[in-house]
Image (tube, helix red, strand yellow):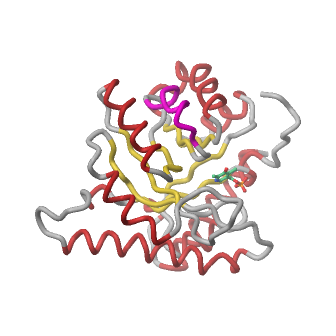
Amino acid sequence: MMKDNIQEIELRIQAACDKVGRMRSEVTLIAVSKTKPNEMLIKAFNLGMRHFGENKVQEMSQKWEDLNDKFGDKVYWHLIGHLQRNKVKYIIDRTALIHSVDSLRLAEQIEEEAAKKNILCDILIEVNIAGEDTKFGVSPGEVLPLLIEISKLTHIRIRGLMMIAPYVENPEMNRKYFTKLRELYVDIKTKNADNNGDGNILNSEYFDILSMGMTGDFEVAIEEGATMVRIGTGIFGERDYTIPI
Ligand SMILES: *Cc1c(COP(=O)(O)O)cnc(C)c1O
């Protein structure tokens, strides 16, 4: 069952890449395992999954503790949900990438904890591209000023941008948002490249991640340039939020 799901997702990722002349290796598949028990993560691991996405700090920490002996450094844990400042310390050295940084205050907290552990923390800036009230993330206009401030923090590396698209029946409805985020991303990269020397905002060599696309719309996201897709339901099946983890 999960094997078939993964095979199907893989075929669809490949087809989306083929459609726009991209290579499969340009797209990282993140298996979003939130609410799913350890056994399902182990199964996914045995089927080749190496990137797991979790949206809650406590749940991710617990799974990390349970599974790290088995997964070790073969697995990359992605924190994709909203992060509260007082919880940064629990995941700072367990996550490969924090997708959801949306304020300087949060970045400063990450900086402080990363400095304590003497590590470099990779992050993405979450952008509320559709301007939805219900979503976290900064507005497109706030991205560059925030990026400039965060780039002064020495234990943080800004790797790119992330968005959560609106829930829609037809994924084509989200194409314009994916396009917009890609344009913003390219714009930042280009501005930065033009800025030779002291004005450099960030090391654009490492500004290389566009995290967008979920089960309902990942093909469109890939066509529009996604380098990471976050897929839960398509791999693990529907989530049941009534079962306690
Ligand atoms: C749950 C979640 C996903 C995966 O959603 P599916 O529709 O199940 O693929 C992706 N990104 C974020 C931020 C999520 O919280």
Q: Picture coordinates of residue 85 (x, y %)?
A: 52, 36
Per the rendered image, the range of residues in magenta is 83-92
92 to 53, vertically: above or below: above
Image side of residue 31 versus residue 210, left or right: right
Q: Residue at x 36, y 52 (%)?
A: 158
Residue 145, image x, y percentages: 36, 63
Magenta region includes residue 88: yes
Image quarter of the N terminus: top right
Q: Residue at x 31, y 59 (%)?
A: 148
- Depth check: 22 or 136 in front? 136
Q: Residue at x 39, y 58 (%)?
A: 146
Seen in the picture, residue 34 relative to 15 is either above or below; the reply is above
| Extreme-right residue of the structure | 242
Q: Nearer the viewer, residue 73 or 193?
A: 193
**Residue at x-position 75% and y-position 66%:** 167
Q: Quadrant of the C terminus?
A: top right
On screen, residue 139 versus residue 145, left or right, reads right
Where 94 sits versus 34, above or below?
Answer: above
| Residue 7 left/right relative to 115 | right
- Considering every residue shown, the one lying at the far left of the view is 197
Q: Nearer the viewer, residue 10 or 173?
A: 173
The x, y position of residue 80, in whole percent, is 58, 47
Q: Main secondary structure of the magenta part?
A: helix
The picture places residue 74, in percent across and down from the top left corner, at: 46, 33
Whether 197 is drawn above or below 99: the answer is below
Give the residue furthest to the front.
105
